[in-house]
Amino acid sequence: MVDKSPTIGILALQGAVREHQRAIERCGAKALPIKRPVELALVDGLIIPGGESTTIGKLMAEYGFLEPIRRRAAEGLAVFGTCAGLILLAKETVEGSEHLLRLMDIKARRNAFGRQVDSFEADISIDAFEPPAFRAMFIRAPWIEDAGAGVRVLAGYNGRAVLVQEARFLACAFHPELTNDLRLHRYFIEEVMKGEVGCQATQNGRP
């Protein structure tokens, strides 16, 4: 449980908003679906959920979210991107994109593990967590093609990075909100949100 019940915004343009909301509330924090840029001022952290990254990116541009999210991130807002959210946090993608937040020093590859019919579950080991393994659900999942020196890889699958942290930014290629395992949401609230702005996470995963 968290001490001061922070408010976590969930970008509610498309994707698994309700599932993240339930997970955040089960962690003891407050969840607020974000539909307007002005609501970003009300939150202590932000989740960008899975969905269709091109669609979410276009909607962010259309509704004026790109610059407000970048500005709040520069002020210290912690951001957690899952699946499509990972792609949107990346500085670039292999395929190229107009509407990226470019907050993390990573290059993402869309649909890297295959299309919808290739979705799968796998047990992965996360460096910051004690056993058991985390049961990860990969649905049209990306992977991290490349990461800068300030990015810490927290988990991989088949030789590819699938969970990374850079200061107050966390990104995963899978869908933690679709499981009953709350460890990643708790890690975001209790560790990532308390990290140093613009500083690399230390080796043990704690800011």
Image (cartoon, rainbow, N blue to C red):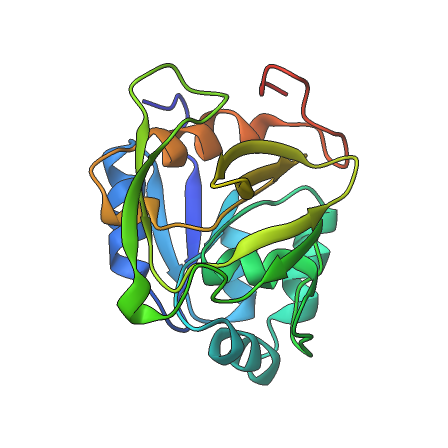
Q: Confirm whether residue 5 shows in the render.
A: no
Query: In percent of the image, x 50 and y 59: which residue is there?
Result: 142
Q: Quadrant of the C terminus?
A: top right
Query: In percent of the image, x 32 and y 25: which residue is there?
Result: 133
Query: In percent of the image, x 47 and y 34: which residue is there?
Result: 188
Q: Please, which residue is most extreme toward the front here?
A: 158
User: Is 144 situated above or below 204?
Assistant: below
In percent of width and height, residue 50 lies at 40, 61
In percent of width and height, residue 4 lies at 41, 26
37 left or right of 19 in image: right
Nearest the eye: 8 or 141: 141
Q: Confirm whether residue 159 shows in the render.
A: yes
User: Is 33 situated above or below 30?
Assistant: below
112 left or right of 201 in image: left
Q: Quadrant of the N terminus?
A: top left
Q: Please, which residue is most extreme toward the left here?
A: 180
User: Is 97 situated above or below 204?
Assistant: below
Query: In percent of the image, x 47 and y 41: which residue is there?
Result: 158
Nearest the eye: 126 or 38: 126
Nearest the eye: 179 or 194: 179
User: Is 57 situated above or below 122?
Assistant: below
In percent of width and height, residue 162 lies at 51, 44
In percent of width and height, residue 37 lies at 55, 68
Q: Count every numbered label the image shows and give the total.
A: 0
